[in-house]
């Protein structure tokens, strides 16, 4: 049984973006902890989604904190646009910039949680030297940019390795987020490995009952 409380961040690209403004008004902030914004530029990843204008408009319809995940090349070029939205966090990809420490510092200076993320092919050790600049670290459990992929089991030992590093050197104060293929069947193992925040796509939006689906994910994470 996993007694640790976890946060669930539904990824809005799993829903209908054309009606998301009215949809998020139905989300219960006592159940839905964050809203995950997958920003894709068609360059760092093949898909193209939305930018700061859409996120800013959507944020006016909900009080649920925004979790902004920048899957974009050279995030330093547009970082100010996302910082101005004052989201709960901004996460950048280790692979997308030559200046990760500078980007993370800029985010933190504005009172926003700064996060670093790595693709499945990037060694976990790559971000160890950047952890002092981070409030959270995101383990991708699928290749980014392709919605609907299955969870990669190799993510479990990667989460465990990162958890050990954080607990040993940072007193466990850096949150671990996991993104990709999370569902009620695997969420217990993912949280037991050390994850604090779970991004949920189809498992959160299936059938249109986001509140019910997120509650079910949290129940499964607790092991009951």
Image (cartoon, grey):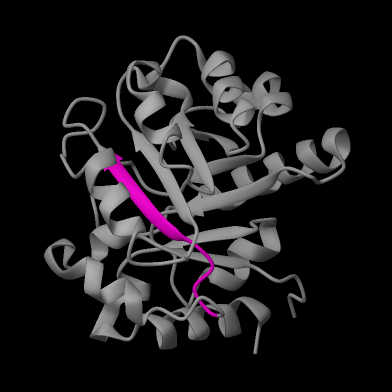
Q: Is residue 89 left or right of residue 146?
A: right
**Please, is residue 149 above or below residue 166 in the view?**
below
Front position in the image: 35 or 219 = 35
Where residue 155 appears, as percent x and y from the top left, is 53, 48
Q: Residue at x 59, y 62 (%)?
A: 190
Where residue 107 appears, as percent x and y from the top left, is 55, 29
Q: Residue at x 16, y 31 (%)?
A: 42
Q: Quadrant of the C terminus?
A: bottom right
Is residue 38 located in the magenta-colored stretch of the structure? yes
Total marks shown come to 0
Q: Which residues are magenta?
A: 31-39
Q: Is residue 31 left or right of residue 136?
A: left
Quarter of the rendering containing residue 219: bottom right
Where residue 31 appears, as percent x and y from the top left, is 53, 79
* Residue 148 seen in the figure: no
Q: Residue at x 43, y 52 (%)?
A: 152
Where residue 28 appears, as percent x and y from the top left, is 46, 81
**Please, is residue 96 above or below residue 64 in the view?**
above
Q: Quadrant of the N terminus?
A: bottom right
Front position in the image: 107 or 201 = 107
């Amino acid at each position: 049984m996993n007694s640790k409380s976890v946060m669930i961040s539904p990824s809005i690209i799993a829903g209908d973006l054309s009606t998301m403004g009215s949809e998020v008004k139905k989300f219960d902030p006592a159940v839905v902890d964050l809203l995950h914004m997958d920003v894709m530029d068609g360059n760092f990843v093949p898909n193209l989604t939305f930018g700061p204008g859409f996120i800013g408009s959507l944020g006016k319809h909900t009080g649920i904190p925004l979790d902004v995940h920048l899957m974009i090349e050279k995030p330093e070029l547009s970082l100010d646009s996302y910082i101005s939205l004052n989201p709960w966090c901004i996460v950048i990809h280790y692979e997308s910039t030559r200046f990760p420490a500078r980007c993370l510092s800029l985010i933190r200076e504005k009172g926003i949680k700064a996060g670093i993320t790595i693709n499945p092919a990037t060694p976990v050790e790559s971000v160890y030297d950047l952890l002092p600049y981070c409030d959270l670290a995101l383990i991708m459990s699928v290749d980014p940019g392709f919605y609907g992929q299955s969870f990669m089991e190799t993510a479990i030992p990667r989460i465990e390795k990162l958890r050990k590093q954080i607990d040993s050197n940072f007193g466990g104060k850096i949150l671990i987020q996991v993104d990709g293929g999370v569902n009620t069947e695997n969420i217990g193992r993912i949280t037991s490995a050390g994850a604090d925040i779970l991004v949920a796509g189809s498992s959160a939006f299936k059938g249109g009952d986001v509140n019910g689906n997120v509650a079910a994910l949290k129940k499964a994470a607790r092991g009951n």
